[in-house]
Image (cartoon, rainbow, N blue to C red):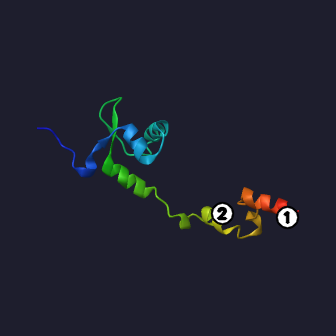
Amino acid sequence: MALAPAGNDRLLTIREVSDLTRLSVGTLYRFVSEQRIPVVHLSRRCIRFRLSDLHRWIEEHTQDACQDSSIDRMYRGADDQSDQGRFVSKHSKLANQEKI
């Protein structure tokens, strides 16, 4: 009796995961060695990734851009004097040079 994977429990190769996540194969191997991504070890040298685990992993590592204050400041501009100039774009520098 063969075990057929149900919908999201399909096992993916590292190349398929690379295509899905747009992460390089090398990065994925590093994540596996650091235990940062869920993996199925079929043997000592053969690994696969369960699609349902990957969906859950992606959801757990997805951040709302509004929650990250550094990204928020980058788009709004610096809020205080200590941050001024940290997020100045190259275009605004060029615009200032043209005014001179």
- Most extreme residue toward the left is 1
How packed mark 1 is, by other alpha carbons closer than 10 Å (few <14, some 14-19, many 20 or more), is few
How packed mark 2 is, by other alpha carbons closer than 10 Å (few <14, some 14-19, many 20 or more), is some
Residue 58 against residue 26 in the figure, above or below: below
In the shown orientation, is residue 98 left or right of residue 54?
Answer: right
In the shown orientation, is residue 49 left or right of residue 35?
Answer: left
Give coordinates of residue 82: x percent, y percent.
Answer: 76, 65
Which amino acid does the dot numbered 1 rest on?
Lys
- Of 26 and 35, nearer the camera is 26
In the shown orientation, is residue 23 left or right of residue 51?
Answer: right
Q: Residue at x 50, y 64 (%)?
A: 64
Q: Residue at x 69, y 67 (%)?
A: 77
Give coordinates of residue 18: x percent, y percent.
Answer: 43, 42
Give coordinates of residue 8: x percent, y percent.
Answer: 27, 51
| CB atoms of marks 2 and 1 within 8 Å | no
Residue 51 against residue 67 in the figure, above or below: above
Depth check, mark 2 against mark 1: the one in front is 1
Which amino acid does the dot numbered 2 rest on?
Met
- Of 98 and 1, nearer the camera is 98
- Most extreme residue toward the top is 45
Q: Residue at x 35, y 38 (%)?
A: 13
- Most extreme residue toward the front is 98
Q: Earlier in the sequence, mark 2 or mark 1?
A: 2
Give coordinates of residue 92: x percent, y percent.
Answer: 75, 61
What whole-number distance in Å separates the C-alpha atoms at marks 2 and 1?
23 Å
Residue at image mark 1: 99
Asked which quadrant contains residue 94, the reply is bottom right
Of helix, strand and loop, which one carries label 2?
Answer: helix
Of helix, strand and loop, which one carries label 1?
Answer: helix
